[in-house]
Image (cartoon, rainbow, N blue to C red):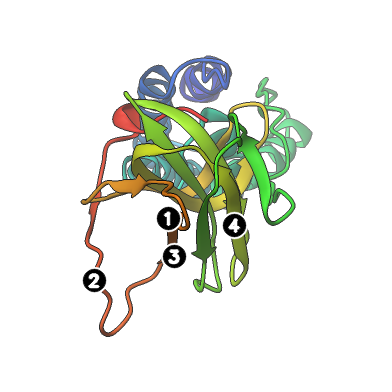
Amino acid sequence: MLAGYVDPVSTALGKINPAANLEAFVAGLQEAASAANSASSGLGLSDTPATVGTTKRQLVTALSQLATDLTKLRGDIKSKDFCTTGSAFAQLGLSEGLKAIPAALAEMTAAGYPTTFTVPQTPALQTRSQENDTFVTKGRLRGLGELSIDNSNGTIDSVVSLSQSGKAVHSLYVGKGKKGSIEGIEDGTYDVFFSEGVDWDPTLKMFTQNCSFSKFDETMAFETKRTTYSTWSITLTAEVGGNARTSDVDEESFPQP
């Protein structure tokens, strides 16, 4: 009976694939949460030998907590607290319910009721950053235009992208509370996007946690004349007297660095 409840949870956890897309990953979390919830309910109502009554209650509590943790993680992914399967998988490893199950099962085994349960091998949750004022994407810089960027937000880093035709021309990493600049921008009209978040993945070129994607409502024009050239300055947090509006955008419409 014990194995009949515990084995499906272990199987469902083993199917959660950090290499899958987020949609498939969330589906795996849902399946595992359902299995953990069923196991918790079933074991809670089951007849139990007196010798393992306390241990069973610990196991029921751990399974219930695991179901809660998995459901919360699904919500955290939806709200973009976790933006990649890698960071979400790392967070799974921090589940208090998941940590408590093996200890309870070890006591069951010692009392003569063995089961098999595999805890997923998850990576550590990271908080990587790129060096401030470095290019993520660097296009041709043969013009005279200049853009100064002030990321006065003291808690999250940002990547600012100048784009044309939906493609990033220049993308600059600006750390929290830092400033950066792009010099040599060629004449033209650019859309200005910025992404903010925690833990920059240099391979995926995106933040893996607390990510957001925004766009300045107005385009930015750079023009070189005989004696003058365009210079722009932006601040990434709202300021009193500021004259630039921004809008949230979907990740899919954000130009890839």
Residue bearing the label numbered 4: 181
Residue bearing the label numbered 2: 243
Q: Check whether the beta carbons of the residues at disc 4 and disc 3 lie within 8 A of each other.
A: no
Say which element carries label 1. Answer: loop
Residue 233 is marked as: 3
Amino acid carrying mark 4 in the image: Ser
Instruction: Name the mark nearer the viewer: 1 or 4.
Output: 1
Say which element carries label 3. Answer: strand
Q: Residue 187: which quarter of the image?
A: top left
- Crowd around label 1: few <14 · some 14–19 · many ≥20 (10 Å): some
Q: Check whether the beta carbons of the residues at disc 1 and disc 4 lie within 8 A of each other.
A: no
Q: Check whether the beta carbons of the residues at disc 2 and disc 3 lie within 8 A of each other.
A: no
Amino acid carrying mark 3 in the image: Ser
Q: Is residue 31 above or below residue 123?
A: above
Identify the residue at horizontal 30%, vertical 29% (top origin). Answer: 253
Q: Check whether the beta carbons of the residues at disc 1 and disc 2 lie within 8 A of each other.
A: no
Q: Is residue 53 visible?
A: no
Identify the residue at horizontal 33%, vertical 46% (top origin). Answer: 221
Identify the residue at horizontal 63%, vertical 37% (top origin). Answer: 136
Question: Which sits earlier in the primary sequence, circle 2 or circle 3?
Answer: 3
Q: Is residue 91 above or below residue 29?
A: below
Residue bearing the label numbered 1: 230
Cα separation between marks 1 and 3: 10 Å
Amino acid carrying mark 2 in the image: Asn
193 vs 137, left or right, is: left
Closer to the camera in the image, 167 or 189 = 189
Cα separation between marks 1 and 2: 17 Å
Identify the residue at horizontal 60%, vertical 35% (top origin). Answer: 142
